[in-house]
Image (tube, helix red, strand yellow):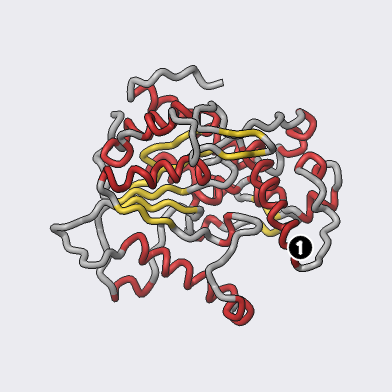
Amino acid sequence: GCMPEEPMRLLFNVVPGTSAEEILVPMMHDLAHAKEFEFVKMRPWRDVGTHEPVFLSPVSKSTMKQGAYDALYMQMNFNLINVNPNYTECSKPKKFIAGKSYFHDLRPEDASNITVREDPIRHVIMLRDPMERFRDQLAEEWQKRNDANKFANKNDMFDKLDLQGCLDVKPCRHARKLGRWCNLQTRMVCGWHRDCGYDYGREVNATQKMLDKALENLEANYSTIMIAEEWDLSIQLLEATHPTYFEGLTEANSKVEPPYCKTFMGEQVCPKNANPKTTAPIHKAHRDMLKDHCWADTILYEKAKEIFYKKAEKCGLKADAPK
């Protein structure tokens, strides 16, 4: 059916390069008080962005080993999602968690030492055409890296190249790990499972096991899948499937005033746009070059669109046939 049993915990995996963080999450935050749910902002996971900050102090970052940092982040994440102050079976506050992190399947070994919630968690996500999303994430994060390099008085020989310029330069393609970042959506949906690691062979890339697990999670654990290219319809679908959280979201989306608008590439972008990013399309020659790099995300995205349009139809929402 259209509306599943409403969960008491809903987790939004925020994918970079979809405009979800800049436009959609603020609208969700504004609904928290009216709809009486707890809004929790999750810290971004280091490996979701090429230039994402970590929450450690400079001293801790220089002394803590990567494995220890990973364990600390996972434990904090687990506690954030599963542990509530004054939690009782009779009083389960609705919790909406949003952040740039992976599908939640964490089970830390010491979880038995704390009282955790056992009610089901459902996930929502917005996905986007892999190559368009990848280009926009890199454009934003390369700018962050440029700013950081200028502050540190460092130079990167590829910093002036956008994605399409980088594709024409083999050393840049290798340095930017295109296979890793162009399959980020698959990596995020796969979760923390042992099958979700990258292939660190000649080029860092997704694996078939990673894709298979991501497809399994997409169908079994995501109550709402949104598509950035179908922005307005996605908002309507999210409200229809989770009304106790998001009733009123479609109305908020119809507004064009700040804070929901943003400036991107010199243009103002608002939620009323079907596609939140308005940059020029990627050239066919460059799309052909990216096929091997973005193979897993391409398959995942096509499956996501199939699920999205079927769900919209079940909810009685007008949707064009998928292209």
- The answer to whether residue 88 is visible is yes
In the image, 17: left or right of 258?
Answer: right
Q: What residue is drawn where x is 23% and y is 55%?
A: 93
Residue 216: x %, y % from top left:
44, 44
Q: What residue is drawn where x is 64% and y is 39%?
A: 264
Residue 120: x %, y % from top left:
28, 51
Above or below, comparing residue 58 to residue 146 in the picture:
below
The residue at which mark 1 appears reads as 149
In the image, 161: left or right of 112?
Answer: right
Location of the N terminus by quadrant is: top left
- In the displayed orientation, state which residue is furthest to the left: 90
Give the SS element for disc 1.
helix
Residue 82 quadrant: bottom left
Question: Which residue occupies the foreground of this view, 285 or 205?
Answer: 285
Above or below, comparing residue 310 to residue 30 in the picture:
above
Question: Which residue occupies the foreground of this view, 144 or 263?
Answer: 263
- In the displayed orientation, state which residue is furthest to the front: 257
The three-letter code of the residue at mark 1 reads Asn
In the image, 59: left or right of 305?
Answer: right
Question: Which residue occupies the foreground of this view, 219 or 157?
Answer: 157
Residue 35: x %, y % from top left:
27, 43
Q: What residue is drawn where x is 29% and y is 72%?
A: 112
- The answer to whether residue 307 is visible is no
Question: Which residue occupies the foreground of this view, 264 or 160?
Answer: 264
Residue 293: x %, y % from top left:
70, 44
Q: How many marks?
A: 1
